[in-house]
Image (cartoon, coloured by chain):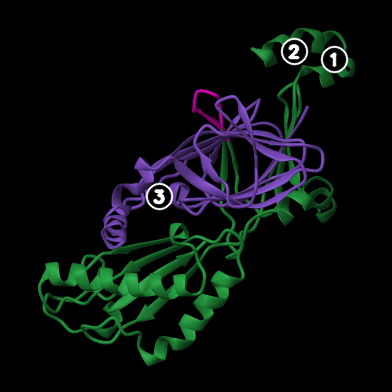
């Protein structure tokens, strides 16, 4: 509706009315923290495709108040001018940790001690940190026993985090038993890499 | 008693994300920044839980960094008004929908599991367009 209203005055006096016709929009696609460049599709309000897909690094699309679309490459200057303060405010990416456990036990393996220290450091270094802890087992034993063991492993990690001052409401723990194997095996198979707790720190 | 509560918490997560009101959390907050929720302005302090339909409002020195339960991340710049229109996320299947409306200001986005699971499940509306997000990091500016 807005853009249609703009067309008539636009034909009469090109520049004057243009700025009054609505917002000026700038879109920029960036390389993400993993080095990948994704894509953005411009759709109409009803969800149908406008036929424009941004998929190049630093590709910048400008849409002026009259709805005309320009595509270019953003310079560092463009980014700094409009987005430096905003980009600085992006929270850190979540981090993923895996701790391995002794067979049929809630004891963290010696080889995982280094990861445990890194986990504690990561948690300590974040503001308003959330931690999601998920326990797993291998396929030895009954499913129901493994559900319990997985939960106990997760609970163990949760306790260790809380001992270091993390609030309970920011540590979520769950047990997945043998439902989510890291290494796919048959039932009743000993697999050390499946005896683990996975932790997401956000 | 506390022990039983802890166990209950363990059992929740499969359904949690849909049952709980919170969709994310404020991790960084500078200057004048608030959330408008059901017509009320709430100061956007670090640690505040974010809910669907909240509107991010920042003043001329305001900035806000938010993480969402699907691992998406937002940064809102100064003089912004950004509505978190729809957020649905199933933590088990990663199915969901995330719609944001940028009325004015600047927004930096890193998309998460909702966009990864299905292209265009995450959308950002601007006054002129709708962006279908197919991954991952991008910027939006709407100047009046």
Numbered tag placed on residue A6 in the rendering? 2
Whether labels 2 and 3 belong to a single chain: the reply is no
Say whether marks 2 and 3 touch (CB < 8 Å). no
Residue B95 position (above or below residue A169): above
Q: Colour of chain B?
A: purple
**Residue tagged by mark 1?**
A17
Q: How would you rate the neighbour count of disc 3 (Cα within 10 Å): few for under 14, some for 14-19, many for 20 or more?
A: some
| Closer-to-camera residue (A125/A12) | A125
Q: Is residue B100 left or right of residue A136?
A: right
Q: Residue at x 26, y 59 (%)?
A: B4
Q: Quarter of the image for the N terminus of chain A: give it.
A: top right
Residue A162 position (above or below residue A83): below
Measuring from the top left, give residue A167's x and y in whole percent: 48, 62
Q: Residue at x 61, y 28 (%)?
A: B40
Q: Find the distance from the CA under tag 2 to the CA under tag 3.
A: 38 Å
Q: Find the distance from the CA under tag 3 to the CA under tag 1.
A: 43 Å
Q: Secondary structure at mark 3?
A: helix
The numbered mark 1 sits on a residue in which chain? A
> In this orientation, does residue B110 appear?
no
Q: Colour of chain A?
A: green
């Amino acid at each position: 509706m807005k853009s249609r209203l703009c067309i008539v005055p636009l034909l009469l006096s090109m520049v004057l009315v243009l700025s009054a016709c609505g917002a000026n929009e700038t879109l920029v696609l960036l390389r993400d923290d993993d080095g990948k460049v994704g894509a953005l599709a411009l759709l109409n309000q009803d969800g149908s495709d406008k036929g424009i897909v941004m998929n190049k690094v630093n590709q910048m699309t400008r849409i002026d108040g009259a709805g005309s679309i320009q595509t270019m490459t953003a310079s560092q200057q463009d980014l700094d001018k409009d987005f430096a303060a905003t980009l600085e405010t992006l929270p850190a990416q979540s981090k993923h940790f895996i701790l391995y456990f002794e067979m049929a036990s809630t004891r963290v393996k010696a080889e995982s001690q280094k990861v445990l220290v890194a986990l504690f450091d990561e948690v300590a270094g974040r503001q308003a940190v959330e931690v999601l802890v998920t326990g797993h087992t291998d396929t030895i034993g009954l499913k129901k026993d493994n559900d319990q063991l997985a939960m106990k492993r997760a609970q163990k990690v949760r306790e260790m985090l809380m001992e270091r001052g993390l609030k309970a409401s920011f540590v979520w723990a769950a047990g997945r038993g043998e439902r989510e194997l890291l290494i796919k095996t048959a039932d009743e198979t000993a697999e050390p890499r499946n005896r683990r707790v996975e932790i997401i720190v956000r | 008693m506390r022990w039983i509560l802890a166990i209950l918490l363990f059992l929740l997560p499969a359904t949690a994300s849909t049952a709980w009101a919170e969709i994310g959390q404020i991790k960084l907050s500078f200057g004048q920044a608030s959330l408008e929720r059901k017509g009320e302005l709430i100061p956007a302090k670090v640690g505040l839980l974010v809910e669907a339909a909240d509107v991010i409002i920042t003043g001329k020195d305001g900035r806000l960094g938010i993480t969402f339960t699907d691992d998406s991340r937002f940064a809102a710049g100064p003089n912004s008004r950004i509505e978190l229109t729809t957020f649905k996320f199933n933590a088990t299947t990663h199915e969901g929908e995330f719609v944001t409306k940028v009325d004015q200001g600047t927004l930096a986005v890193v998309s998460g599991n909702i966009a990864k699971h299905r292209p265009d499940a995450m959308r950002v509306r601007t006054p002129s367009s709708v962006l279908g997000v197919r991954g991952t990091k991008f910027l939006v500016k709407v100047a009046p």
